[in-house]
Image (cartoon, rainbow, N blue to C red):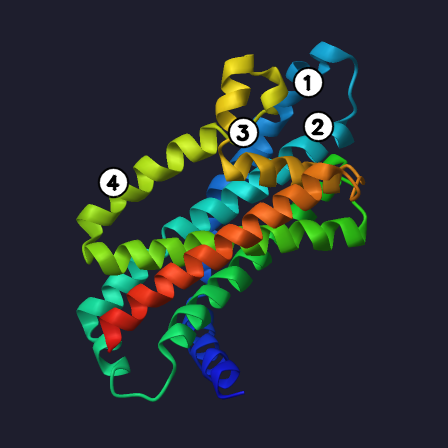
């Protein structure tokens, strides 16, 4: 119970800081909104190559990928705030508190997850006028997938930030890591359009499984193998990332 209380206290503090400047939630939405408004309409001719498709089908294909992209980027760049806290002495002051070191990490990461889910709900609502339709249970499972991705990527970002302790070093590392992961996940277009060799390379990208699973849920097919495969992979990697980042956190504040 003490551990859960520690997580809740850290989460509350981080959420309070976010709510003092909620504008950042909407600033982070700018890029996905531009994709939704300016890129998604271009997909209908491309997806129609295999036969006529409706607007609803286009957005059921595009919005899940967009949400996964939001979860990846939203998590991978959280480490910059942690480096700022390191420089300001926030992490140093944590050494004298009885709060669990793992709770310090999980409280931060859970706030990142909540922020991501708020943005995901906004994107989903904005896509409804364009014809997107998705069942509530399927949508909740998709949000669970996104939450696991955000937890994994934010924990990874915090761990790397504690390792590097420099924004100048963290930026190129995160950019180098994120670009191939995004391109090989089929976020903008399904990888069924890709050459076979590229599909085989993408099989090693965990986010491609997450995108496939999220698309299956938006298509109303929660029993598809891609759903449980995506959930299993993201859950496993989230546990590994949290365990590694928690160890880095404990070393930094002990």
Residue under label 4, please give it. 172
The answer for how far apart the CA atoms under marks 3 and 4 are is 25 Å
Query: Of callouts 4 and 2, which one flags the residue occurring earlier in the amino acid sequence?
Result: 2
| Numbered disc in front, either 1 or 4 | 4
Within 10 angstroms of label 4, few (less than 14), some, or many (20 or more) residues? few
| Numbered disc in front, either 4 or 2 | 4
Residue in view at x 38 percent, y 81 percent: 100
Query: Of callouts 3 and 2, which one flags the residue occurring earlier in the amino acid sequence?
Result: 2
Query: Of callouts 2 and 1, which one flags the residue occurring earlier in the amino acid sequence?
Result: 1
Residue under label 1, please give it. 47
Residue under label 3, please give it. 203
**Quadrant of the rendering where the C terminus is positioned:** bottom left
The answer for how far apart the CA atoms under marks 3 and 2 are is 23 Å
The answer for how far apart the CA atoms under marks 4 and 2 are is 33 Å
| Numbered disc in front, either 3 or 2 | 3
State left or right for residue 197 relative to residue 250. Answer: right
Q: Quadrant of residue 175?
A: top left
Depth check, front residue: 11 or 239? 239
- Tell me where residue 220 appears, x and y as whole percent: 80, 40
């Amino acid at each position: 119970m003490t551990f859960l209380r520690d997580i809740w206290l850290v989460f509350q503090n981080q959420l309070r800081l976010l709510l003092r400047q909620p504008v950042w939630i909407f600033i982070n939405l700018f890029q996905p909104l531009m994709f939704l408004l300016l890129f998604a309409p271009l997909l209908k001719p491309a997806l129609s190559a295999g036969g006529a498709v409706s607007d609803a089908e286009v957005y059921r294909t595009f919005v899940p990928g967009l949400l996964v992209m939001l979860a990846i980027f939203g998590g991978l760049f959280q480490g910059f705030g942690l480096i700022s806290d390191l420089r300001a002495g926030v992490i140093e002051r944590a050494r004298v508190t009885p709060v669990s070191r793992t709770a310090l990490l999980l409280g931060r990461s859970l706030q990142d997850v909540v922020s991501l889910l708020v943005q995901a709900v906004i994107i989903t609502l904005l896509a409804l006028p364009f014809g997107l339709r998705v069942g509530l249970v399927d949508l909740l499972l998709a949000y669970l997938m996104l939450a696991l991705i955000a937890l994994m990527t934010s924990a990874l970002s915090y761990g790397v930030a504690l390792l590097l302790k420099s924004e100048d070093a963290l930026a190129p590392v995160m950019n180098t890591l994120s670009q191939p992961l995004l391109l090989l996940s089929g976020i903008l277009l399904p990888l069924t359009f890709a050459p076979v060799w590229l599909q085989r390379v993408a099989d090693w990208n965990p986010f491609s499984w997450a995108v496939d699973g999220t698309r299956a849920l938006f298509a109303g097919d929660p029993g598809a193998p891609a759903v449980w495969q995506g959930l299993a992979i993201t859950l496993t990697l989230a546990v590994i990332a949290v365990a590694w980042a928690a160890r880095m956190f404990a070393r930094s504040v002990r």
